[in-house]
Image (cartoon, rainbow, N blue to C red):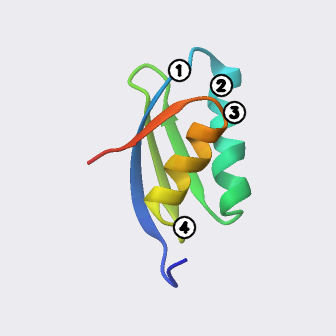
Amino acid sequence: MSNLPEKIVLNVEGMTCGGCVEAVKRVIRKADPSSVVEIDLGSGRVEAVSVVSSDILAQAVTKAGYTAHIGA
């Protein structure tokens, strides 16, 4: 973990509804309870401000059943 939060962008495939959005938010907040998460369901874009690395967040989202790639 870093000391300072950074903006992380993930492209997530497999989110089809509001329940999926909430599930992804829960996974990210479990990894970093202080994170701020915004999700655009239509594009699959997830933006998180977190102290946890993008690799760890992508792995956590993928482990939850979605396909997550680090975006730009």
Q: Residues within 10 Å of mark 1 (few under 14, many from 20)?
A: some
Marks 2/3 in contact by CB < 8 Å: the verdict is yes
Foreground mark, 1 or 3, reads 1
In the rendered structure, which amino acid carries the disc numbered 1?
Gly
In the rendered structure, which amino acid carries the disc numbered 2?
Cys
Foreground mark, 1 or 2, reads 1
**Element at label 2:** helix
**Element at label 1:** loop
Q: Residue furthest bottom?
A: 3
Residue that label 2 marks: 20
Marks 2/4 in contact by CB < 8 Å: the verdict is no
Q: Compare marks 2 and 4 and give the one earlier in the sequence.
A: 2
Q: Residue furthest left?
A: 72
Q: Residues within 10 Å of mark 2 (few under 14, many from 20)?
A: some
Pick the quarter of the image with the N terminus. Answer: bottom right
**Residue 52 bears which disc, if any?**
4
Q: Compare marks 4 and 3 and give the one earlier in the sequence.
A: 3
Residue at x-position 44% and y-position 58%: 54
Alpha carbons under labels 1 and 3: distance apart: 13 Å
Residue that label 1 marks: 14
Alpha carbons under labels 2 and 4: distance apart: 21 Å
Q: In the figure, residue 31 lies in which quadrant?
A: bottom right
Alpha carbons under labels 4 and 3: distance apart: 19 Å
Marks 1/2 in contact by CB < 8 Å: the verdict is yes
Q: Position of residue 23 (x, y in %)?
A: 70, 34
Foreground mark, 4 or 3, reads 4
Residue that label 3 marks: 22
Residue at x-position 62% and y-position 16%: 17
**Element at label 3:** helix
In the rendered structure, which amino acid carries the disc numbered 3?
Glu
